[in-house]
Image (cartoon, grey):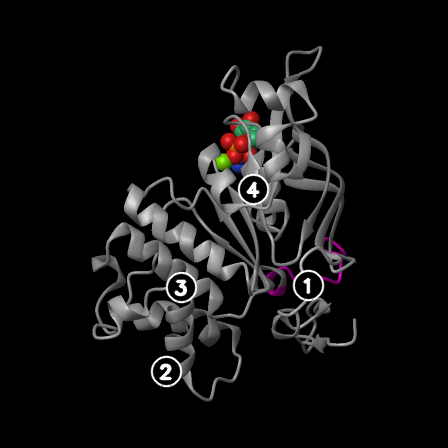
Amino acid sequence: MTDTTTTTRPAGGPVSLTLPDADHQRHRPRGSEPVIELAGVSVFYGDYEAVRGVSMDIGANEITALIGPSGCGKSTVLRSLNRMNDLIPGARVAGRVAYHSQDLYARDVNPIEVRRLIGMVFQKPNPFPKSIYDNVAYGPRVTGRKVSDMDGLVEDALRRAALWEEVKDKLKQSALALSGGQQQRLCIARTIAVRPEVILMDEPCSALDPIATGKIEDLMHELSKTYTIVIVTHNMQQAARVSQRTAFFTADVDTAGVRHGRLVEFDDTNRIFTNPAQKRTEDYITGRFG
Ligand code: ADP
Ligand code: MG
């Protein structure tokens, strides 16, 4: 990897991660080296091991879906990919999560920079109570990046999120007046505006109607040409429609009666839904369990 940017070190703060600039990552062929690698990842909430021993690779410019029954640790694993679990008191990640081969949890890594490069979109659209414009401009403003053309940046992010045509004449209006589906696309635009490489989405359509869901799915497909996407979904049809790779998780009960999430099978989406290797996967996708 030759293209890297080094962000400056805040006085007295931790050394920032030296990471590839997202803009230089965009033309790598599918199936090349993984963007994120998990090796033996376990996540604890206090003493409770919610997820145990997950190993998987996230490929560049692919959509990877995480599926499985409620409580099996999908959101927990997703949050471990950009250090969102750091924000939960008592949460701890063991094992290795590497981003372009660098340990995301190393002491000198700046979690704020991690979350810029690996953005997150949540289940319930959560625009700020600000104008549409200010929602998109928020990230670039707080990260302190010098932006010579903020209007252009806002327009570009809204176009990439397939929202521009619907909002271009009302950029100063409150984001809260938008429909749920528009709000979710605005949240995607807000994420894109800080130039991430990876976008994590935790059940991004579960609060949306089928038409708005279809728009987000089309958008995901379009975005995957530029970004790497990991989506948690409880909707198996959605996983089958949008993703190239699918990870099936479940929760096993140990001898003490405690449930621990684990990765059962990770493969091409087509394979998972037509000819899975594990009976647990087959039982789940055929609706016999979960
Ligand atoms: P999923 O997204 O697959 O429904 P989660 O990752 O939300 O599953 O949860 C996995 C397990 O971790 C569950 O047993 C859940 O109760 C527990 N858990 C999730 N978040 C927390 C938290 N903040 N504190 C304590 N336990 C949690
Ligand atoms: Mg969840």
Front residue of this view, candidates 107 and 151: 151
Q: Nearer the viewer, mark 4 or mark 2?
A: 4
Residue at mark 4 to residue at mark 2: CA–CA distance: 34 Å
> Is the residue marked 2 within 8 Å of ligand 2, measured from its CB?
no
**Residue ID for mark 2:** 151
Q: Position of residue 290 (x, y in %)?
A: 51, 19
**Residue ID for mark 4:** 65
N-term mark: 4 or 2? 4
- Residue 238 placement: quadrant: top left
Q: Is residue 251 visible?
A: no
Report the span colored magenta.
103-113
Q: Which labelled disc corresponds to residue 161? A: 3
Q: Is residue 181 magenta?
A: no
- Residue 43 placement: quadrant: top right
Residue at mark 1 to residue at mark 3: CA–CA distance: 22 Å
Residue at 73% x, 76% y: name it: 3
N-term mark: 4 or 1? 1
Q: Amino acid at mark 4?
A: Ala
- Number of numbered discs on residues: 4
Q: Secondary structure at mark 4?
A: strand
